[in-house]
Image (spheres, coloured by chain):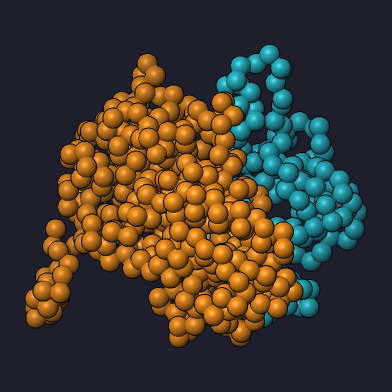
Amino acid sequence: MREPPREWHIDEPQARRTQPIAVLAASAAGVFQPIKNMLRISCPHCGIRDEVEFAFGGPSHVTRPAFEVSDAEWADYLFNRENPKGIHYERWQHAYGCGRWFNAARDTVTHEILAVYRMGDPKPVLPGAPRGRAP
Amino acid sequence: MQRYSLVNVIRHALRSNTRWQPAWRDPQPQRAYDVIVIGGGGHGLATAYYLARKHGLRRVAVLEKGWIGGGNSGRNTQVTRSNYFYPVSSAFFDHSLRLYEGLSRELNFNVMLSQRGLISLAHSEHELETNRRWANAIRMNNVDSQMLTPAEIKKLVPLLNLHSRFPVVGGFIQRRAGISRHDAVVWGYARAANALGVDIIQGCEVVGFDLAGGRVNGVQTSRGNIASDRVVMSVAGHSSVLAKLAGLRLPITTMALQAMVTEPLKPVLNAVVISASVHAYVSQSDRGEIVLGGGADAYNSYAQRGGLPLTRSTVAAAIELFPTFSRLRLMRQWAGAVDVTPDTTPIMGLTPVHGLYISCGWGTGGYKAIPAGGDTMADTVANNRPHPLISRFGLDRFPKGALIDEGAASGVAH
Ligand SMILES: Cc1cc2nc3c(=O)[nH]c(=O)nc-3n(C[C@H](O)[C@H](O)[C@H](O)COP(=O)(O)OP(=O)(O)OC[C@H]3O[C@@H](n4cnc5c(N)ncnc54)[C@H](O)[C@@H]3O)c2cc1C
Ligand SMILES: [Zn+2]
């Protein structure tokens, strides 16, 4: 594990600050320090990194049913999603890092990442779940 | 309803504008309604309006947990177009654009439709080929579209940099497309529905359904129970949460779609410009702000707050196209919780629960669909069968595999 970076808040109300577009674009090109408003994800293999290094893989724990199921059940597996307002158990890949996949439990309202766990591990038991407050 | 007209403006001005009535009442919920519409966005309000106007239903309520237009209908970038690829999409969205063309008169409310044209850019020969196929498909669908050379584009949009990192090699235009005023659409439908007796009840959240024997008998709300055997769900990003209360699972993912505006300028841009490759679209609002939009954040979100990486890439793409805009300051950035389907086509029609109807999956592009969405949904509810224009938009297309992969076909989401 690398050194965890200094603390910062993902919730900083960046929207209220006025930024010249050129500064935003320059920071996109890495010229300036990144502005603080993105996910900081802890890869189980590499430590905490910026959101831009990761690829989102959709919900985790979706199990493929047997081949004999009805069309309705097959469609439920293919298309229907839990899509909770609160804790979402999801897959991420550290695409621009070690390349490995892992799971995270993230609050879809606060964007807070509550747990990171390995592919194949069961959903972690989180205190106070289900959560999520109105925006 | 007090009509808005030049005569009335002068009459009220003479009385120092002290006698204008509120545009809609603030009624208490009644015990029962003929139809309850959940969600006071454009789709919910338009559905209620057409139920009252075209189908003679007078006891209709719109229940809105916050304030009307507080969801995506008041947060979007107002692009109003019908240049869709598949005939079934094109027929529906062009019906919508036609309704938009007469909407200010219909509602007696200026929705500020400005058909300034929408230009889709191609940045490579391959993209130009795809654009040509798309533009021709649109014409086959009886909707206007026309290929443009770089010189023609430059004439329409002088500030556009054709020789950017991804040079502009051509594009096509739908001249009838453009923008309109989102708040006016919401308020116009609300005012006109109210005038026909529809109760618009704000600050009223639906928290459960009264179900028995596979039918709906009413809803439970933060302001008590309300009975009705016909209930429409039109709550956009909250569709999965609401449908779950009725025991339904939906093929919807809720994501944050963001937009931003710069400080206002004098008129400099008289078209909507979309680039699917660099993924940004740009227009100028009637207040002079440059409106920038792009894609949605990749992950599920109900936060109504977009992440910075996408803000940056959108801005970077926009100033690549319009280098002069790099001098501008961003005034605001915001996001809405959009309801995205696997095929980016909306979900409209009946549900497995008798009397419960759904209008959702509008995702990143349902503002332009508000008039047609309301019109066809009202007809569907009044007759308890899908309106012909939306018969292929039902939930049953998923088990059938009859997806309408419009996003892939048209290559752009808005
Ligand atoms: C940034 C952005 C840009 C966009 N740009 C465009 C564009 O250029 N062109 C275009 O065509 N489309 C665009 N869209 C998409 C468009 O805004 C939406 O598809 C459309 O507004 C959806 O309308 P609606 O009425 O279904 O939902 P909404 O307007 O979101 O209304 C749903 C309402 O339901 C209410 N609600 C939720 N749960 C409950 C409950 N339990 N009880 C009571 N009420 C509830 C909410 O408070 C909300 O007011 C954009 C969207 C965003 C976010
Ligand atoms: Zn890693």
Vertical position of residue A98 compared to residue A25: above or below: above
Which chain is represented by orange in the image? B
Q: Viewer-proximal residue, B361 or A92?
A: B361
Left or right: where B138 falls relative to B127: left
Residue at image position (38%, 45%) is B373
Q: Viewer-proximal residue, A59 or B322?
A: B322
Where residue A118 sits, quadrant-wise, is: top right
Q: Which residue lies furthest to the top in this view?
A: A68
Residue at image position (81%, 36%) is A119
Left or right: where A41 falls relative to B306: right
Q: Looking at the figure, which quarter contains the N terminus of chain A?
A: bottom right
Q: Where is residue B5 in the image (x, y as percent from the top left)?
A: 15, 70
Q: Viewer-proximal residue, A43 or A130?
A: A43
Residue at image position (58%, 82%) is B159
Vertical position of residue A69 compared to residue B273: above or below: above
Where residue B73 sits, quadrant-wise, is: bottom left
Q: Viewer-proximal residue, A89 or B322?
A: B322
Q: Position of residue B62 (x, y in %)?
A: 29, 44
Where residue B11 sits, quadrant-wise, is: bottom left
Left or right: where B137 falls relative to B377: right
Q: Position of residue A114 (x, y in %)?
A: 70, 46
Q: Where is residue B351 in the image (x, y as percent from the top left)?
A: 43, 28
Residue B76 visible: no
Count of all numbered marks drawn on residues in the image: 0
Residue at image position (23%, 58%) is B107
The colour assigned to chain A within the rendered structure: cyan
Left or right: where B207 falls relative to B218: right
Vertical position of residue B318 compared to residue B92: above or below: below
Residue B136 visible: yes
